[in-house]
Amino acid sequence: MEQRQIANRIYYFAYILALFNAVMVRSFFASHFGKFISINYLIVWGLIGLREFVLLCKKQYHKYTWVMLLLAAALALLVIKNQTPAAAIEFATIIPLAYSARNLEFRTLAKITAIVETCLLVFVIACALFGVIENYRIGTYDIYGIESTSRVRCYLGFLGPLFPLTFYLNIEMMIVYLTKGKLRAWHAIMLLAGACAIFLATEGRLCFLLSVATVIFGWGYSLWCMRTPIPEGSKAEQIWLGIATIFFPVMLVFSVAVSYFYNGEIGLLAKINSLLEGRLRLAHDGFTSFGVSLLGNRIEMFGQGLSTTGQVRTAGYNWVDNAWMNILFRYGILFTGAVCALYSRLMYALARKRDYFTIVLFLLIGMQMLIDDCNLMYYWNGLLLMLAMYSFGGNDVSKD
């Protein structure tokens, strides 16, 4: 077998183990398999190192590769220094995984993500429903700590109420991407039924709406857009190019501006804050609580999730769900600007390749970033691997 194929298979095995760790550590299995998961991370690091050694021996390392390796190392150090030890271990896995995926095909990783996460999600939920692990239930709390017994949320075996639906949204994204204009009606109905079932248990409203939007887009593209392609060189093509290029910078500027200038006495902002369940106010408070610096700060945010032993956190709720603001507070201006620039570069490349389908998926991710920070992780946002592949390897994004 060719050495590069061996190196690729080594990566796939490492990636599967990393996905297993990501799902299990966020479920009630975390307390049972804690030591095993730590060993798994060591195995993942070893496999990534072995893959890179094979590529080095095959003379797959060039000047650009070494430069990107230094960049990946710098990003890893910048992120890890602002994390707790447990989170630092995970990020010490995410960055090498992203770098090592630079010369792979995204479709293969999308298939692995969809299959592995589906199996793990079904496994955890089944174990919770059959009493193998706890299916934690709680009345809904608002950001002021007031409980509403009219809405009861089931965690379905996970340590946070939004985790099941967020994993499911990523699975949907991967399936819709893989079908790419061939999503049939019965596939769409099955995906929507799964989203509805999880939503009824977890009450993750905003994430559910994004799930519905993703499926409707995939199905709608199959029905209409494939039949009416955008003419090459047309004004519509130029508009798409412009939208794709500036979308993420606009989202970043909008997030910072609205968060910084938020005032609960302004009617429109108060309504938006209420619609987003207090997310604007929390982001605004972050400027005072956490501050903004060039290289970021080590800060602690507390949400509604449970500890790894299933205990309710007693600290006050101060989690900033807006992904851009979360990055800005944690990792600083330099890192936030770099992420925004990489997103824009990828979107520009997709637009030049006329891959409007993938652009719309990234637009949905961009909208999600306004209300959720989960998409900063590859196991909740598989499209991040495409960003990493293009950033570190300069992959031809159209070949997939």
Image: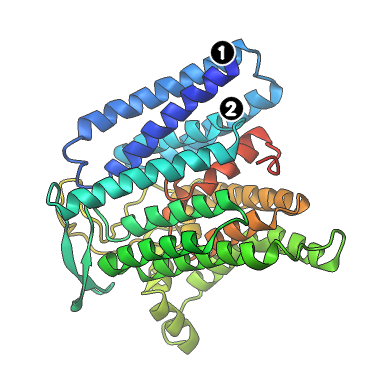
Amino acid on which disc 1 is placed: Met
Q: Position of residue 287 (x, y in %)?
A: 43, 64
Front-most of residues 12 and 377: 12
Say above or below: 142 vs 72.
below
**Number of numbered discs overlaid on the protein picture:** 2
Q: Is residue 389 above or below residue 342?
A: above
| Label drawn at residue 1 | 1
Q: Quadrant of residue 191?
A: bottom left
Q: Nearer the viewer, mark 2 or mark 1?
A: 1
Q: Quadrant of the N terminus?
A: top right
Task: Give the mark, 2 or 1, whose residue is nearer the N terminus.
Answer: 1
Front position in the image: 131 or 312: 131
Query: Measured from the top left, where is residue 83 in percent x and y?
Result: 37, 42
Q: Residue 92: tell me if it is visible.
A: no
Q: Are marks 2 and 1 in contact (CB under 8 Å)?
A: no
The answer, for residue 121, to whether it is visible in the render is yes
Give the residue displayed 58% in from the left and 58% down from the top.
Answer: 361
Q: Amino acid at mark 2?
A: Leu
| Left or right placement of residue 22 versus residue 75 in this view | left
**From this viewpoint, which residue is outermost toward the top?**
57
Q: Residue at x 70, y 50 (%)?
A: 350
Query: How many other residues sit within 10 Å of disc 1, few (<14), some (14-19) or many (≥20)?
Result: few
CA separation in Å, label 2 and label 1 = 27 Å
In the image shown, does 362 or 226 lie closer to the viewer? 226
> Tag 1's secondary structure?
loop
Give the image location of residue 130, x and y in percent.
14, 52
Q: Which mark is residue 69?
A: 2
Q: Nearer the viewer, residue 221 or 174?
A: 221
Residue at the far right: name it.
233
Residue located 64% across and 40% down the image = 390
